[in-house]
Amino acid sequence: MPAGKTRTTESSPPTQRVISIVETLAAHEGSLTAAEIADGLELNRSTAGVILAALTERGWVRRLPDLSYELGPALAVIGRQISDRRGDRAWLNDELERLADRVDCGAALTAISGDHLEFVAVTRDRLTAGIEAGARIPLLAPAGAAIIAHSGAARQRDWLDTRGPERRDEYRAVLATLRDSGYCAWRLEPDSLPTVRVFSEVADHLAEHPASKELRGRVLAQLATIIGSCYDRSTLDEDVPLPLSYMSAPVFDDSGHAVMELQIGPLRPDVTRLERRRYLAELTESARRITDGQQSIP
């Protein structure tokens, strides 16, 4: 029997084909082309292509530049959720709390699951009220930029298309900054802080009312967009105080794929260059530790 091919059962044949493709990719060291997958599982090539396209759209598999496929980041999110239920990742929450203490502001760790951004872990802070681990919001640019920056070109285009054309060039530059420098930092618009506080308080209030889950999701989605504009590196390094909303950096898996985004939210109008450098050092060091921790888990 070809690797990853399941036994015939009473269950739906289309479902079995999907499962078989995922299992084949999981069992194989490296990537496989659609033809290799189809031939190995004795599937029609066009059927395999349709299944792979659907799995790619949901983030279950990733299409590489050479047109081969490997498992995608959405499965990593599911794996983390299972690990969380087993209590294997208390260290992740501890790392986030320590980071928040060192930078004296809120911190969050997010991952992409299909067309949503999920909060894997989040610290309790006066400006992150209403956001908790497990919360999901629609994936709309610029949310998830640190992950998308290291994704394929098609995924980046889809992400850019979630917003209107007026900011597409700006967000394309954000992705380039993240690839070049490994982080990005966002301006705090002068009138945004009161709005952030109001949205946070509303989301916190709605969390107590399960019937308001959909409305709370919309509030959180709006909250995620109030971050201002991204700094270029030269401006961020100027020796003057600057307004700073958020800073983010990617977290990688053991294959070098960006699977999570680590964020801190100073939300301050006058951050000095020395303070910005300290924020960046703490953020990137914590992202490195989480990356190392991810890779050490069997």
Image: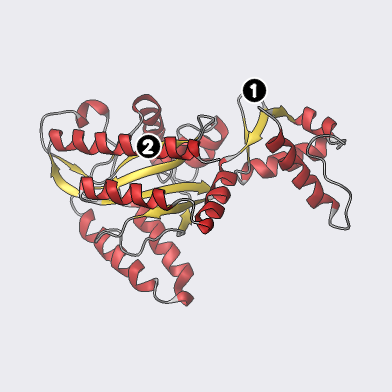
Where residue 159 appears, x then y in whole percent?
49, 41
10 lies left or right of 104? right
Splitting the image into 4 quarters, where does residue 82 fall? bottom right
Where residue 186 appears, x then y in whole percent?
27, 41
Q: Can residue 101 be seen by looking at this rendering?
A: yes
Q: Are marks 1 and 2 in contact (CB under 8 Å)?
A: no
Q: Is residue 233 above or below residue 269?
A: above
Q: Can residue 114 be seen by looking at this rendering?
A: no
Q: Residue at left 69%, top 40%?
A: 53
Q: Residue at left 38%, top 40%?
A: 167
Q: Nearer the viewer, residue 45 or 281?
A: 281
186 lies left or right of 242? right
The image quadrant where one finds the N terminus is: top right
**Mark number displayed over residue 66:** 1
Q: Residue at left 37%, top 24%?
A: 180
> How was the colour assigned to the protein in this rendering?
secondary structure
Where residue 40 appears, x then y in whole percent?
83, 32
**Mark number displayed over residue 289:** 2
Where residue 144 appears, x then y in whole percent?
43, 43
- The kind of secondary structure element at disc 2 is helix
